[in-house]
Amino acid sequence: MSKRNVSRRQFLNYTLTGVGGFMAAGILMPMVRFAIDPVLKASASGGYVATSQKVSELTAEPIRVDYTFDQIDGWYESQVTNTAWVYKADDGKIVALSPVCKHLGCTVAWNTDKEHPEQFFCPCHMGRYTKDGVNVPGTPPIKPLDVYETQEKDGILYLGLLKPHEGA
């Protein structure tokens, strides 16, 4: 067996490389975990939020439905209240519209403009939408109101994610 002497320069080189590797691993591991952790967490809610609205009480007249859900933002958890305009269409399908105007984000209300009854009206810039959420031509909004996915469970209305209005 041959005897190899390690010079001081080689010893320092090996030592500093090893220490540097441990330091790099200590810095990179939290970053990797931070990036991968949200992917590994499973969502238990399924995306739908229960409202207090009974489906049997819905009519062809849009009503305002407020609902509350828990929102987690980093380490801060809060309860958020949102709103939807909900009615039953002529075919019996439940329609839930976002109250946010597509012009500048103001809140629309149903049947509040005396000159244009039976429409959603945005008081900020006189924007109007038909009952099905389609923007009236010649008014400021350039897109229709967004639509919530809906689901009925045990007679209660559940609202899902917002999606763009189809067919407009």
Image (spheres, grey):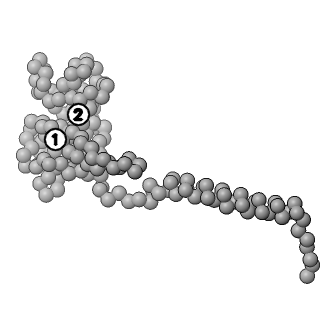
Residue 95's quadrant in the figure? Answer: top left
In the picture, measured across the screen, residue 9 lies left or right of residue 136, that is right
Residue 47 visible at all: yes
As helix, strand or loop, the secondary structure at mark 1 comes to: strand
Q: Identity of the amino acid at label 1?
A: Val
Q: Position of residue 49 (x, y in %)?
A: 24, 50
Q: CA distance from mark 2 to mark 1?
A: 10 Å
Residue shown at 12% from the left, 36% from the top: 62
- Quarter of the image holding residue 110? top left
Residue 146 location (% of width, % of height): 27, 36
Residue positioned 30% across, 41% down in the render: 163
Q: Amino acid at mark 2?
A: Pro
Look at 16% across and 41% down and name the residue there: 65
Give the class, few, some or many, for how many residues have Cα within 10 Å of label 2's Cα (few <14, many ≥20).
many
Instruction: Identify which residue, 135 or 125, lies in the foreground.
Output: 125
**Whether residue 132 is situated above or below residue 47 in the rendered picture:** above
Mark 1, residue position:
65
- Residue 141 position within the rendered picture, expressed as x and y whole percent measured from the top left: 28, 24
- Residues packed near mark 1 inside 10 Å, few (<14), some (14 to 19) or many (20 plus): some
Q: Would you name the residue on which mark 2 appears?
A: 99
State whether residue 160 appears in this view: no
**Quadrant (top left/top right/bottom left/bottom right) for the C terminus:** top left
Q: In terms of depth relative to the viewer, which is nearer, 80 or 111?
A: 80
Looking at the image, residue 58 lies above or below residue 105: below
The residue sitting at 11% across, 17% down in the picture is 115
Q: Kindly check if marks 2 and 1 are in contact, taking CB atoms under 8 A apart as contact.
A: no
Sequence-earlier tag: 2 or 1: 1
